[in-house]
Image (spheres, rainbow, N blue to C red):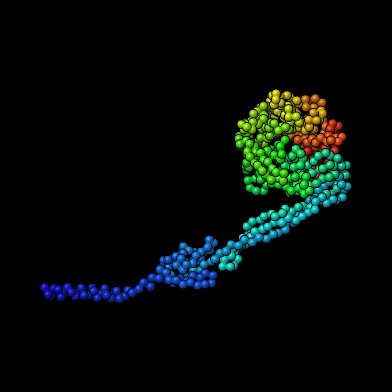
């Protein structure tokens, strides 16, 4: 037993000695599991010892170093450190600087037939504009690494220099009542007292002509400008004609294609309808809605509320609906491809009086008849199409509608689709004339030229005024009456002929050319 114990003790002793040697080879501390890290921050160095496998963010937290929103590190904060490392903090600073830059004015040359050939006249001196450019600078540890344009703001629009140049033989000036405005070359012009007195109203060069309407008192012009912004077709503006230097005012209304009008009998109230832009032809989807906007005497928008919600607009409603207030403001008429009637604003409903057969145009447009109220508000003149034959051809009749009592009268047959009747705007006028257009080829009225016609409102005493027989006809348009003058000056109808403004004396039919540059697109006169 004693011998056995001695024999078993030797292996045990050898095992204990081996464990002691192994333990002696193991470090007494854990210092060999730590790594040295140097952090550089804006030229300052920080030292730290951290466990192997620590990430950069933890190192910064141990040293009490924080990063700003734009700051970064090299290597990035999520990097795992497995050996001695150097971390660099890059302090990023964002600085905004502004710079004002002069925007040079442009020169516009306007031809004037009232001046002798070669004669020039400075209508409006040019003024440079001013824009403020905001730059965004990025600084890394105090050094600029990027400089980009952050924002451009127009502080003052440049005012173009406008010089009138006499062309051809001078046209004799004509004395006129009221304010006559016309759109030429994307700009709005005012003729006051005489055709020799022309004043620039809006010189931005981007008026699209969709809306161009004077207020009932002739003191304000409502118009639309093309828009360069995505999702906008145009924008709605006003300008006061009575100020020394008219300043355009943005009404902050977009996408007005078919209708915007001053409401008669109210103070600076406008109604308008909108569309939604589309990439497919015709470029919009009509909302067929109606809004009322009220502005202050200085042009500020006081109220803008919706009278009619968006709706389908009947057959071919994608094209749009147009409206027209009666002169006394009692009725609001509407016209769309399938009907003409009046709007019940209280119930937000369309009450048809005349059903139409929607015209198959074969194109990306729809035919909508125009509306023209008599001055006393008793009759609404419009156009109706008859039976539709091959290729969508149709006959068109000028009609008069009465709301109270309800009745419809055929006034002139085979006028063409763009007859556009316009009654004389005053009740004092005698006789109660109606100007309209007559298609030279009624069966092809979509492409036909037209003649300016005059009649009494019952359809009697029809006469052709302009152009003379055998001359090139008029493009479809809406004739514009001159306002009634207190003097014995003649009554006029303004029209556009071959791109120029012409005045036709009533009832003689004597015509006078007013402009000669071929750029006139729209007219209004109050």
- Quadrant (top left/top right/bottom left/bottom right) for the N terminus: bottom left
Q: In this view, does 311 lie to the left or right of 413?
A: left
Q: Is residue 9 left or right of residue 460?
A: left
| Residue 128 seen in the figure | yes
Image-quadrant location for residue 222: top right
The residue closer to the viewer here, 282 or 179, is: 179
Image-quadrant location for residue 333: top right
The percent coordinates of residue 29 (x first, y second) are 35, 73
The residue closer to the viewer here, 148 or 179, is: 179
**Residue 500 vertical placement versus 143 (above, below):** above
**Residue 360 vertical placement versus 182 (above, below):** above
Q: Name the residue located 46 percent from the left edge and 64 percent from the top edge.
A: 57
Q: Name the residue located 62 percent from the left edge and 57 percent from the top edge.
A: 150
For the view shown, which residue lies furthest in the left direction? 1
Q: Name the residue located 63 percent from the left edge and 36 percent from the top edge.
A: 307
Q: Name the residue located 71 percent from the left edge and 40 percent from the top edge.
A: 268
- Quadrant (top left/top right/bottom left/bottom right) for the C terminus: top right
| Residue 440 seen in the figure | no
The percent coordinates of residue 224 (x first, y second) are 70, 43
Mark count: 0
Image-quadrant location for residue 442: top right
The residue closer to the viewer here, 159 or 411, is: 159
Q: In this view, does 173 lie to the left or right of 36?
A: right
The percent coordinates of residue 138 (x first, y second) are 59, 63
The percent coordinates of residue 287 (x first, y second) are 62, 38
């Amino acid at each position: 037993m004693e011998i056995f114990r001695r024999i078993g003790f030797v292996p045990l002793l050898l095992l204990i000695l081996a464990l002691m040697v192994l333990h002696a080879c193991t470090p007494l501390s854990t210092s060999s599991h730590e790594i040295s890290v140097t952090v550089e921050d804006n030229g300052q160095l920080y030292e730290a010892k951290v466990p192997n496998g620590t990430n950069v963010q933890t190192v910064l937290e141990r040293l009490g170093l924080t990063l700003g929103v734009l700051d970064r590190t090299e290597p990035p904060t999520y990097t795992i450190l497995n050996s001695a490392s150097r971390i660099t903090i890059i302090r990023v600073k964002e600085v905004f600087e502004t710079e004002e830059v002069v925007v040079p004015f442009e020169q516009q040359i306007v031809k004037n037939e009232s001046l002798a050939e070669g004669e020039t006249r400075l209508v409006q001196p040019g003024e440079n504009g001013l824009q403020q450019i905001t730059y965004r600078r990025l600084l890394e540890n105090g050094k600029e690494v990027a400089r980009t344009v952050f924002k451009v703001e127009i502080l003052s629009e440049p005012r173009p220099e406008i010089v009138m140049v006499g062309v051809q033989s001078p046209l004799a000036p004509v004395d006129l009542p009221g304010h006559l405005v016309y759109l030429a070359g994307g700009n709005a012009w005012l003729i006051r007292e005489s055709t020799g007195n022309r004043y620039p109203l809006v010189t931005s060069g981007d008026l699209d002509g969709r809306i161009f309407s004077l207020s009932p008192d002739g003191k304000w012009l409502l118009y639309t400008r093309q828009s360069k912004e995505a999702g906008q077709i145009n924008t709605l503006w006003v300008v006061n004609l009575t100020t020394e230097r008219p300043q355009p005012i943005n009404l902050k209304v977009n996408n007005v294609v078919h209708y915007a009008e001053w409401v008669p009998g109210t103070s600076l109230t406008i109604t308008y309808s909108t569309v939604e832009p589309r990439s497919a032809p015709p470029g919009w989807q009509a909302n067929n809605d109606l809004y009322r906007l009220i502005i202050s005497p200085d042009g500020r928008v006081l109220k803008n509320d919706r009278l009619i919600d968006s709706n389908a607009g009947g057959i071919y409603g994608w094209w749009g609906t147009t409206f027209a207030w009666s002169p006394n403001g009692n009725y609001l008429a509407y016209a769309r491809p399938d009907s003409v009637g009046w709007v019940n604003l209280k119930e937000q409903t369309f009450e048809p009086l005349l059903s139409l057969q929607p015209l198959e145009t074969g194109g990306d447009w729809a035919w909508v008849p125009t509306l023209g109220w008599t001055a006393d508000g008793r009759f609404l003149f419009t156009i109706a199409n008859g039976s539709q034959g091959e290729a969508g051809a149709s006959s068109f009749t000028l009609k008069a509608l009465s709301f109270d009592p309800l009745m419809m009268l055929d006034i002139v047959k085979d006028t063409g689709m763009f007859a556009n009747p316009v009654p004389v705007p005053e009740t004092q006028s005698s006789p109660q004339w109606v100007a309209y257009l007559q298609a030279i080829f009624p069966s092809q009225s979509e492409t036909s030229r037209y003649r300016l016609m005059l009649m009494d409102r019952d359809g009697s005493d029809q006469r052709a005024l302009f152009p003379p027989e055998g001359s090139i006809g008029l493009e479809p348009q809406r004739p514009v009456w001159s306002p009634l003058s207190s003097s014995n000056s003649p009554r006029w109808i303004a029209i556009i002929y071959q791109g120029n403004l012409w005045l036709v004396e009533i009832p003689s039919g004597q015509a006078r050319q007013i402009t000669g540059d071929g750029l006139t697109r729209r007219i209004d006169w109050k």
